[in-house]
Structure formats: structure tokens, C-alpha cells
Image (cartoon, rainbow, N blue to C red):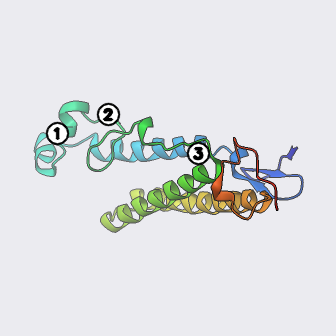
């Protein structure tokens, strides 16, 4: 059904891309690893005074300078933050939203930093979020183009039978 290409993603035999077949989840875990590495490199040599003065003390008390995935607010990452409904249209829209939120986060980081060793990897990660957004958008378009219904939001194409055209 699929053929391999020199790209990171798979391509359907008819030439349409399929983000679902790609290793986007694996790449996103790589993003987490890269950001965690940047945070560790920036914090590993802090003095006690720098830790206290920077507002880093509450994190340091719990995690020293270990990488513990949290939002900037301190809220820890959890699988509970992932939204999955089992409906391809709902899930692809959620994926689109997640990619945009990640891009905005990287935009905000770029507004706050002036270290080229931080800026360059963050710019790379931001570019990947844009590509993921485009691929998920293509996946949503391909899905809705294949549905034989004028009102495809009225049912779950991954579970329900598609209504017949009248």
C-alpha cells in the first residue's frame, strides 16, 4: 500500500502523503529531548545565588537540574494533556492545534533569548512544527475529500458507517 521515499514520511502509491504513517510521534519525543538538553545545559552550572535570584529555586528543590518536562507555569507534562477521540476528523484537528501551540511556544522562546546556541535549535524545532501542521492539514483534506457525504462532521468516519448520499 505504501512505498518508501527519501523523505521522512511515507507516500501513498497514488502520490498522496500520509502523516499518520510517518514517525511524527517519535520526532516529537526528539523535540522534548532537545528542549530538555538545552534547559539542562543552561542550568547545570548555576550558582546557589543564581538559582535563588532567577526564580529557579522551586524547580531546583524538586528536580535539582534534572530534566522534568513541565510547562513554563510549572504544570508537569502528562498524557492527560493529550486529546484523542478516536474520530479521525476530531483527532486531526487536535493535532493541528497542538502543532500551532508548539510553534507559538517556540516563537515566544525566540522573543526572550539572545543566545545563538539556544536560538538555532529552537528555530529548527519551530520549522518542524510548521511542517507537521502542513502535513496534518493535508491529511485532513485527504480524509474529507474521500468521505462520500456532504455533512462529514455528523458522524465518526473511523467508527460509524458512512451515510449514503440521497
User: Badge 2: few (under 14), some or many (20 or more) residues near its Cα, within 10 Å?
Assistant: some
Q: Secondary structure at mark 1?
A: helix
Which of the 4 quarters of the picture holds residue 84? top right
Circle 2/circle 1 CB separation < 8 Å: no
Q: Earlier in the sequence, mark 1 or mark 3?
A: 3
- Left or right relative to 135: residue 78: left
For residue 58, the mark is 1
Disc 2 from disc 1: Cα separation: 13 Å
Q: Left or right: 129 with respect to 6?
A: left
The residue under label 2 is 66
Q: Residue 87 placed where, x, y %?
A: 62, 46
Q: The residue tagged with tag 2: helix, strand or loop?
A: loop
Nearer to the camera, 44 or 160: 160
Q: Is residue 122 visible?
A: no
Q: Position of residue 29 (x, y in %)?
A: 52, 41
Say above or below: 86 vs 162: above
Q: Is residue 162 visible?
A: yes
Which residue is at 29% across, 42% downward? 75
Is residue 93 shown above or below 156?
A: below
Quadrant in which the N terminus is drawn: top right
Q: CA distance from mark 1 to mark 3?
A: 30 Å
Q: For numbered disc 3, what is the local secondary structure?
A: helix
Q: Residue at x 72, y 60 (%)?
A: 144
**Relative image position of residue 81 (x, y in whole percent):** 42, 42
Determine contact: label 1, label 3, CB under 8 Å: no
Tell me, yes or no, whether the two marked residues, 3 and 2, touch with CB atoms within 8 Å.
no
Identify the residue position indicated by label 3 in the image: 27
Taking 13 as reference, is 159 left or right? left
Please tell me how crowded label 1 is: few (under 14), some (14-19), or many (20+) other residues with Cα within 10 Å. Answer: few
Mark 2 or 1, nearer chain start: 1
Tag nearer the camera, 2 or 1: 1
Amino acid at each position: 500500500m505504501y512505498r518508501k521515499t527519501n523523505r521522512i514520511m511515507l507516500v501513498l502509491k497514488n502520490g498522496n502523503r500520509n502523516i499518520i504513517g510517518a514517525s511524527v510521534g517519535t520526532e516529537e519525543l526528539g523535540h522534548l529531548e532537545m528542549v530538555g538538553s538545552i534547559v539542562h545545559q543552561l542550568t547545570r552550572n548555576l550558582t546557589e545565588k543564581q538559582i535563588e535570584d532567577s526564580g529557579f529555586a522551586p524547580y531546583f528543590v524538586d528536580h535539582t537540574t534534572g530534566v522534568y518536562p513541565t510547562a513554563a507555569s510549572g504544570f508537569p507534562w502528562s498524557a492527560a494533556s493529550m486529546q484523542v477521540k478516536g474520530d479521525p476528523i476530531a483527532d486531526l484537528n487536535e493535532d493541528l492545534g497542538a502543532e500551532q501551540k508548539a510553534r507559538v511556544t517556540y516563537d515566544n522562546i525566540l522573543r526572550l533569548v539572545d543566545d545563538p546556541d539556544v536560538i538555532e535549535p529552537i528555530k529548527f524545532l519551530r520549522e518542524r512544527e510548521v511542517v507537521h501542521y502542513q502535513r496534518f492539514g493535508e491529511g485532513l483534506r485527504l480524509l474529507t475529500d474521500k468521505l462520500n457525504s456532504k455533512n462529514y462532521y455528523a458522524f465518526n468516519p473511523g467508527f460509524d458507517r458512512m451515510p449514503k448520499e440521497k
